[in-house]
Amino acid sequence: MALIDPVLLKPRLGHLAGRFDVDALDECDSTSSELMRRADRGAPAGTVVVADRQSAGRGRRGRTWMSSPESSLTFSLLWRFPGPAARLSGLSLAVGLGLAQALETLGVCGVRLKWPNDVLIESAEGFAKLAGVLIELASDRRGIQAIIGIGINLDAPGGDFSMPVTGINQACPSSPDRHAVLAAILASQVGILEKLTVEGFFCLKSEWQRYHAWHGQMVQILTDGATPQVGRCLGVDDDGALLLESASGIERIHSGDVSLRPAGSALGDANA
Ligand code: BTN
């Protein structure tokens, strides 16, 4: 029996229940891969696949995503946009924002966003990753199709990670039930995705920046095979690009991994 029961989820979604068709699986390769196959067969917007185990869970930038049934929540949501694609430039950040807002309504403390959409928790010990988002886009005659894959730690996973990790149960005094977590996230995504479709990321930008983990701080951007770029992180622009100020001016960053630059680094120290 899967850990998510769609029957228990429905009342928690309230008036939004009809917007979603949730299928809970014991196991699949990846909820995003499974949902992509269903989307190709014509699944409607609002289809959700949630799985206890993924044998080939995928993360951003070609990484794998590990999850374990009791201590994580892994699911993918299908959404369709009428287009044009340019409207969706901030989609990745918008989804992260919806996730952050949902977690805050559940009582999770210290929620922050690391560009483009990692959810971090800030505590006295520093920053730790709580959740990640993987968005995959395709277009067909109906417009743009987005597979929005979300992985959340309910408990901090063990193992070696590139940054510290944490879980909802560590960051929230009340340890919310997983059905409440999933319902809150799905509900917040409806509002955010509709706002993005109608008004664009411009209208979500200031709210995103309210959660921005490293606003005004020195960071480095790692991009495959390139020299790390170093600069002061000025937030995001109307399209969701990260604004990085270095000795050579302000650059718009569209991809890469951001991390805090260790103390003592100089502005424009691009080759360090
Ligand atoms: C990241 O690298 O931070 C993004 C991780 C996204 C993982 C989720 S888990 C549910 C969905 N299915 C996948 O295979 N990946 C996403």
Image (cartoon, rainbow, N blue to C red):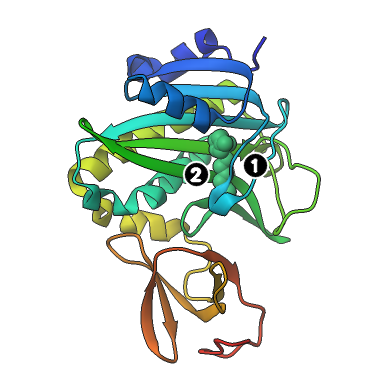
Image position of 230 (left or right of 263) = left
Q: Is residue 95 above or below residue 30?
A: below
What residue is rendered at 34% in x and 60% in y?
A: 240
Ligand 1 neighbours mark 2 (CB distance < 8 Å): yes
Q: Is residue 127 above or below residue 175?
A: below
Report x, y in % for residue 7: 51, 7
For marks 2 and 1, give the CA distance: 10 Å
- Dot 2 lies on which element? strand
Front in this rendered view, residue 57 or 21:
57
Image position of 164 (left or right of 108) = right
Front in this rendered view, residue 91 or 35:
35
- Label 2: which residue? 134
- Label 1: which residue? 65
Front in this rendered view, residue 141 or 203:
141
Image position of 247 (left or right of 83) = right
- Dot 1 lies on which element? loop
Q: Residues within 10 Å of mark 2 (few under 14, many from 20)?
A: many
Q: Earlier in the sequence, mark 2 or mark 1?
A: 1
Name the quadrant containing residue 19: top left
Q: Quadrant of the N terminus?
A: top right
Amino acid type shown at disc 1? Trp
What residue is rendered at 42% in x and 21% in y?
A: 38
Q: Is residue 175 visible?
A: no
Which dot marks residue 264? Answer: none
Front in this rendered view, residue 244 or 213:
244
Report x, y in % for residue 69: 71, 26
Ligand 1 neighbours mark 1 (CB distance < 8 Å): yes
Report x, y in % for residue 185: 47, 32
Q: Residues within 10 Å of mark 1 (few under 14, many from 20)?
A: some
Q: Quadrant of the C terminus?
A: bottom right
